[in-house]
Amino acid sequence: MAMNDDGCVTANLAAGMTPAVALFRSLADETRLRIVQRLAAGEARVVDLTGELGLAQSTVSKHLACLRDCGLIDYRVEGRQSFYALTRPELMDLLQAAEGVLAATGSAVALCPTYGTTHARAVTQ
């Protein structure tokens, strides 16, 4: 699988990318992670997500498409509305385990010179 500019996994296969790498890359974006966490509470429409997360409709739709392409969410149509939901509830077990790792490592991940908050600030400035 290959990545597009926003880090979403695309359908093209890239040499050396394992499914695990694709999974973690799909969750590496803060917006996608927030959407997944919100969908853990139950189904939501795009309009629900835009209001609750304070994001533009185009942003939410783009990230929903990415998560759908990865098989992590899907939707059902009811009338003219689409309701999005997690396809794999065990994804929340993975995120809970990640929270445990973060708690155990303290601030080490946040201070990581490659991926931590210091790096993120430098990249956005």
Image: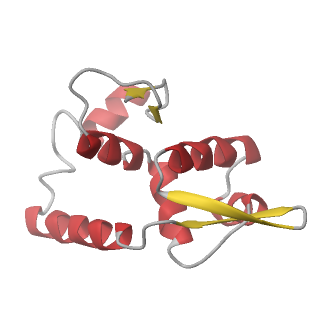
**Residue occupying the point 15% across, 57% down:** 107
Judging depth in this view, the residue of 13 and 30 nearest the camera is 13
Image coordinates for residue 39, horizontal then vertical, percent? 55, 69
Residue appearing at x 48%, y 52% in the figure: 71
Q: Residue at x 19, y 33 (%)?
A: 114
Relative to 28, residue 97 above or below: below
* Front-most of residues 35 and 68: 68
> Viewed as shown, does residue 80 lie left or right of 100?
right
Query: In the picture, which quadrant includes the C terminus?
Result: top left
Rendering quarter of residue 97: bottom left
Is 65 left or right of 102, judged from the image as shown? right
On the image, the x and y values in percent for residue 5 come to 48, 24
Residue under the image location 59 percent in, 78 percent down: 42
Toward the top, the furthest residue is: 15
| Residue that sits furthest to the bottom in the current view | 41
Give the x, y percent position of residue 35: 54, 60
Q: Residue furthest right?
A: 80
Quadrant of image for the N terminus: top left
Provide residue 41's location: percent of width, then percent of height: 54, 79
**In the depicted structure, whether residue 107 falls above or below residue 113:** below
Above or below: residue 75 compared with residue 1: below
| Towards the viewer: 118 or 41 | 41
